[in-house]
Image: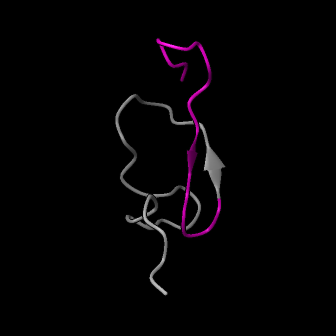
């Protein structure tokens, strides 16, 4: 997926397992495709 404003490829990074991926759709992913964690965008507690 390409950002319409800056023409760069959009990538997401899982804060839990460190996986980096390119989304297929424009909306926010529900889970990380690697670890399947729904809180992929929030770092672990302690």
Q: Which residues are magenta?
A: 1-18
Q: Position of residue 19 (x, y in %)?
A: 64, 57
Figure coloring: one colour
Q: Position of residue 45 (x, y in %)?
A: 44, 82
- The residue most toward the front is 46
Q: Main secondary structure of the magenta part?
A: loop
At 55% from the left and 69% from the top, the residue drawn is: 16
Give the camera-side residue of 24 and 5: 5
Horizontal relation, residue 34 to residue 28: left or right: right
Q: Position of residue 14 (x, y in %)?
A: 55, 58
Q: Name the quarter where the N terminus is drawn.
A: top right
Above or below residue 23? Residue 7 is above
Q: Would residue 9 be counted in the magenta stretch?
A: yes
Q: Would residue 42 be counted in the magenta stretch?
A: no
Q: Quadrant of residue 41?
A: bottom left
Give the camera-side residue of 38 and 15: 15
At 42% from the left and 57% from the top, the residue drawn is: 31
At 38% from the left and 64% from the top, the residue drawn is: 38
Q: Quadrant of residue 6?
A: top right
Above or below residue 39? Residue 32 is above
Horizontal relation, residue 31 to residue 14: left or right: left
| Count of numbered marks | 0
Q: Position of residue 39 (x, y in %)?
A: 39, 65
Above or below residue 11? Residue 26 is above
At 48% from the left and 77% from the top, the residue drawn is: 44
Horizontal relation, residue 34 to residue 42: left or right: right
């Amino acid at each position: 997926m390409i950002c319409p404003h800056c023409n760069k490829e959009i990538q997401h990074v899982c804060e839990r397992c460190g996986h980096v991926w390119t989304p297929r759709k424009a909306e926010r992913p529900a889970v990380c495709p690697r670890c399947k964690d729904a809180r992929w965008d929030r770092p672990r507690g302690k």
